[in-house]
Image: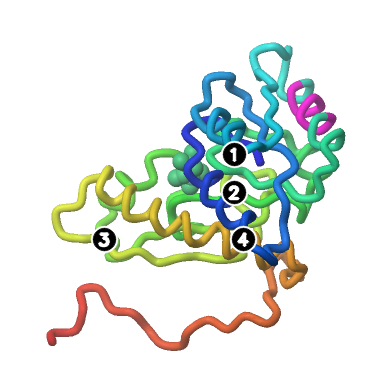
Amino acid sequence: MLISGRGSNMKALIEAARQPGYPAEIALVLSNRADAAGLAAAAAAGLATRVVPHRNFPDRAAFDAALDAALREAGVDLVCLAGFMRLLTPGFVADWRDRMINIHPSLLPAFPGLDTHARALAAGVRFTGCTVHYVRAEMDSGPIIAQAAVPVAPGDTPDTLAARVLAAEHRLYPLALRLVAAGQVRVEGEHAMIEGHRAPAGPILNPLEPG
Ligand code: GRF
């Protein structure tokens, strides 16, 4: 798992991986920042942690080579980005193609990048949400594995909306990782196809229909 900050999604994945029968095991939590709060939480959970400070490297390619070496040394099969705030080079992304997933707090392809909640509010959308996707070289792009829709409430601020979306992220990421780790997801023509998992049918309205 690659993190840069508080690591609340990381904690949700740690919690999930503790459950009996969960098909993934966390081999390493790696951060580009020594002060990432999530590192201490990972260490407290008894996980291997490592810091690879991006500032120690002359360019992105050198940093990514160090990341790659650390991941391979730890025997990693699948990389989960969880609030990892560095852009990865196309070479690194290609090496981990379909073996690296990310969570983003919007219904991609809407609102990639930063300040997603403020932009969702400015656009006046009735729903936003979060997306787990395979990583491609362009920021916040790649085959969509799973999404959660979250209603925008009257009076929402970016912070209140972010908190509602974050709660959904903590449910979505463990579900998506479970599907990927169990081999239930394959990428075909840049679409993620899921086997053995049925989505509920029918629309959800926001505002709700008058009761
Ligand atoms: C989350 O909103 C995630 O979707 C985004 O960065 C934030 C990380 O939060 N990529 P945390 O470190 O997991 O608490």
Q: Amino acid at mark 2?
A: Ile
Of labels 4 and 2, the one closer to you: 4
Secondary structure found at label 1: loop
Secondary structure found at label 3: loop
Q: Left or right: 81 with respect to 94?
A: left
Q: Residue at x 38, y 40 (%)?
A: 115
Q: Residues within 10 Å of mark 4 (few under 14, many from 20)?
A: few
Q: What's the CA distance linking mark 2 and mark 1?
A: 8 Å
Q: Residue at x 66, y 52 (%)?
A: 101
Q: Amino acid at mark 4?
A: Gln
Can residue 113 be seen?
Answer: no
Q: Amino acid at mark 3?
A: Val
Quarter containing the C terminus: bottom left
Residue 53, horizontal then vertical, whole percent? 66, 18
Which sits earlier in the primary sequence, circle 3 or circle 4? 4
Reply yes or no: does residue 65 show up in magenta. Answer: yes
Q: Amino acid at mark 1?
A: Ala
Reply yes or no: does residue 73 show up in magenta. Answer: no
| Residue highlighted by disc 2 | 14
| Residue highlighted by disc 1 | 45
Residue 152, disc: 3
Quarter containing the N terminus: top right
Q: Residues within 10 Å of mark 1 (few under 14, many from 20)?
A: few
Rendered position, 152 above or below 161: below
Residue 19, disc: 4
Which sits earlier in the primary sequence, circle 4 or circle 1? 4
Q: What's the CA distance linking mark 3 and mark 1?
A: 34 Å
Q: Tell me whether circle 4 and circle 2 mark residues in contact (CB < 8 Å).
A: no
Q: Residue at x 58, y 22 (%)?
A: 33
Q: What's the CA distance linking mark 4 and mark 1?
A: 14 Å
Residue 141, horizontal then vertical, whole percent? 60, 52
Secondary structure found at label 4: loop
